[in-house]
Amino acid sequence: MLTAHELQDRLVRGDCSSVEIVQELLAAIQEVDGTIRGYLSVDAEAALAQARAADAARATGRGGPLLGIPVAIKDVLNVAGQPCGCASKMLRGYVAPYDATAVAALRAAGAVLLGRTNMDEFAMGSTTENSAFQVTRNPWSLEHVPGGSSGGSAAVVAAGEAVAALGSDTGGSIRQPAGFCGCVGLKPSYGRVSRYGLTAFASSLDQIGPMTRDVRDAARLLGVMAGHDPHDSTSLPAPVEDYEAGLPVSGGLRGMRLGMPREYFGGGLDTEVEAAVSAAVEECRRQGAEVVEISLPHTRYAIATYYIVACAEASANLSRFDGVRYGHRTAVAGDATELYLRSRAEGFGAEVKRRILLGTYVLSSGYHDAYYLRAQKVRTLIRRDFDAAFERCAAIVCPVAPTAAYRLGATGGDPLKMYLGDVFTVTANLAGLCGLALPCGFTAAGLPVGLQFLGPALGEARVLRAGRAYEQATAWHTRRAPHAAGMARTEAGGK
Amino acid sequence: MSAARYEAVIGLEVHVQLKTRSKMFCGCATSFGAEPNTNVCPVCLGYPGTMPVMNREAIRLTVLSGLMLGCRINPRSKFDRKSYFYPDMPKNYQITQYDQPLCLGGGVEIEGASGLATVPLTRIHLEEDVAKNMHFATCSGVDFNRAGSPLMEIVSEPAMHTPEQAVAYLQGLKQTLMYAGVSDCNLEEGNMRCDVNVSLRPVGATALGTKAELKNLNSFKSVLLALRAEIGRQEQLLREGGRVVQETRRWDVEAGATFLMRTKEDAHDYRYFPEPDLMPVVLSEQQIAEWARGLPETPRQRRARFASEYSLPEYDARVLAADKAVGDYFEAAARGSKAPKIVSNWVMTEMLRRLGETGQEIAAVQITPAALAELVELTEAGAINSNTARELFGELFANGGSPRALVEARGLAQVSDSGALQALVDQAIRENAKSAEDFRGGKAVALKFLTGQVMRLSRGKANPQLAAQLLEERLKK
Ligand SMILES: [Zn+2]
């Protein structure tokens, strides 16, 4: 299982073609996706055509960091001419008329858009079990979830069915599945990557980011997608650094001051996760990092704050799905109101309905101030916690999630339990920070444990440096999942 | 039955479509009359993943309107989402401004029975327009061409008390917005729409009564009649001991009455919250000052200027400044003229009368301001008489052209040559001996008749003053 940068080197040397890479991946999908079920759709013909075009471009002297590299796309992102269903019945039959800006950037860089990955419906969930269509399994254990909501993207990368994938992260939806599946996931700072074309869940929290096999690939994809977009007024005008060139060759953690939030290492943290993360922090120290304890006192309000803000915004964002212009429309409706009620009742799943109801409630007159307004105030306090923390450290090191991957069905009856699993990830979205998840060990049952580096807004270069240095010092990211493609065969040829 | 006397309290919410080339949040054209659903894109259709991008020109035009109306411009305003489900709303929420509008305060000057007064404004904010629902025999459709067009909402204080004041307010507002050049302000075409709130209270009371909101008012006349009808309805209700219920009522032109649309119980909970896809609008002092420097003249400024610059009576200045296009036309004609008052007379009488008759816009008439100036010049120089001038005006109004060229081509020039007139004077005296005798006998009025005869013989071309003078000279000999 090669990374994008390794494959790019081979393409440059002429050791293989983009068509061969795509064929290899199609074979891998053929082999394992019947079990993993990470893809909702794969357009093999279109992917091969793009690969041929990339090979032809290379033959005329064109190059570039992603030319001919296949990337899987989460079903929440619009790709012109492809379905964009958000794993919901509500958008069945909807074909996107335009490219998301991030997708257009990949296309312009010559990447091959491979297929669409499964997710929790409208990105609402932490297990990908809320998909209206299929259950995706964790390539490390088929009895476990891949995490969510970008569970399909994480699973196909971990299973060797994709070199890299795009996910979206509203409260941890890139980092948590990356952690559960033992791959790398980066949530950029709010506004670093354009959201235009990302079907909105919670507009003030959403970000698109890469899910890859190593930190260097994450840096490479971020470099292609980051930057200001005139179509997204909230995208940041700050210049884009050369993230990949800024990665350390060695010793990237030397002299870096890392903060360990006291509140993240208390009760509720699974002992195996705590052991793995503590060992990882120890490794960082060995690599020359200075580790200090910091405090994020408003952490205990983070989950409530997050679910109020996210659901409030979602309740408006999802209002457009009404059966009038696109997507699911009920078969029989007498008037407009009935059309809305029936179409939405039939189209949305339980978790989406729950969040729309919650969001509608917290914004309704009489409750708006007590919930929505108060949540915004707490959000400011949480942001200040981080402002103060980053005065004391360059980056924060902590777990991605309190536990390793859940068993399938374990959170089904208890949404609150699932919500609490987001405690270490939602804060980065509430505060607009960047966060990198990468593997740092395994439980006794063989499930990956994720490590998280959090940086201030626009601190991507910093967390990527820390992550790359850690990854170079360890070998967790090179381990292969037992249910990945090719595991049944011998690993001849290095693939 | 109560004998109390009631006072109406009226407030208006006016929506005005701004004249921008593109929509509020996307690049689609705002032109109207196109085939349904042709000026649309994923953004204004509310497709998944799309995001709004602010049209700066709409901000500028709103601030311009605010400055013209004496509002305070908010240095920091923001946009909010207003949620409700309706098929004309692509996203089922409207992007509008809730608690931090672009403009605050200000006022509209109106002319009332007791002179000039100012109706205070609460606020002006900016929002996106909705689509148009269309109903057919077996189904309904939505035309999204209008969806997302920039719409400015101007909210007055409840400070008017008669239907006439409300109409004067609308006229004054329209006048100023036309001067600002921000909108066409046509009620009939829907680029100016107004909702009226009206309540009654006993004369002398200060607390507001329960209001009704009136909709479907698409002409000044509808506003006037609907308010009269609604005030009558509420008054009767109160006199009979009833209570006004807060509700929205629809004006029915045919029936000449308002009818219940919905009560407060059906009112939406709009669930406003800040639009997370847009940054707050921050306007620097320099930016506002720069826009203020480029501000067009207000109607009041133009009235004063016309009076002093063109030595016009107050009345003329007011009539000419009432409609910006009329004022513009006058000024274009009067600028180079030695007789601006005569130009004013022509515009106020012949021009306005013919515009009224034909329903034409002054900006589109055939007779150019330069042609009118020339016509005035020809009259003032005595080259044509006033009858000829009026005829020529009609000709130019209908077909355009140059007055001087017409005069030459048709030999319409006034005969002011005493040699040429002398023969006609003699002929008139010869043919009307009785009148000549009367004049000699002291009947001055006979001279008028004889002058008329000279005019007739000259087919209207004689200079009447000269003809009278020659007659007099001849008869007194
Ligand atoms: Zn548009």
Image (spheres, coloured by chain):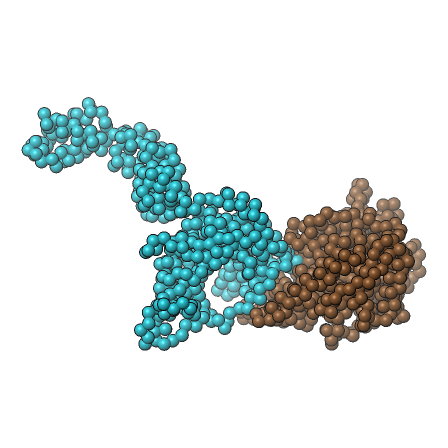
Chain colours: A brown, B cyan
Residue B265 coordinates in the image, percent (x, y)? 50, 73
Residue A347 coordinates in the image, percent (x, y)? 65, 69
Q: Residue at coordinates 48% horizontally, 64% vertically from top-left?
A: B137
Count of all numbered marks drawn on residues in the image = 0
Residue B473, placed above or below residue B312: above
Quadrant housing the N terminus of chain B: bottom left
Q: Left or right? Give the position of B372 relative to A482.
A: left
Q: Nearer the viewer, residue A163 or B215?
A: B215
Residue A470 coordinates in the image, percent (x, y)? 87, 57
Q: Residue at coordinates 37% horizontally, 65% vertically from top-left?
A: B8
Quadrant housing the C terminus of chain B: top left
Residue B405 coordinates in the image, percent (x, y)? 34, 30
Residue A353, placed above or below residue B364: below
- Residue A351 showing in the rendered view: yes
- Residue A80 showing in the rendered view: no
Q: Residue at coordinates 38% horizontally, 76% vertically from top-left?
A: B242
Q: Nearer the viewer, residue A386 or A406?
A: A386
Q: Residue at coordinates 59% horizontally, 52% vertically from top-left?
A: B282
Q: Nearer the viewer, residue A94 or A382?
A: A382
Q: Nearer the viewer, residue A354 or B297?
A: B297
Task: Say which quarter of the image contains residue A157.
Answer: bottom right
Residue B429, placed above or below residue A313: above
Task: Say which quarter of the image contains residue A437.
Answer: bottom right
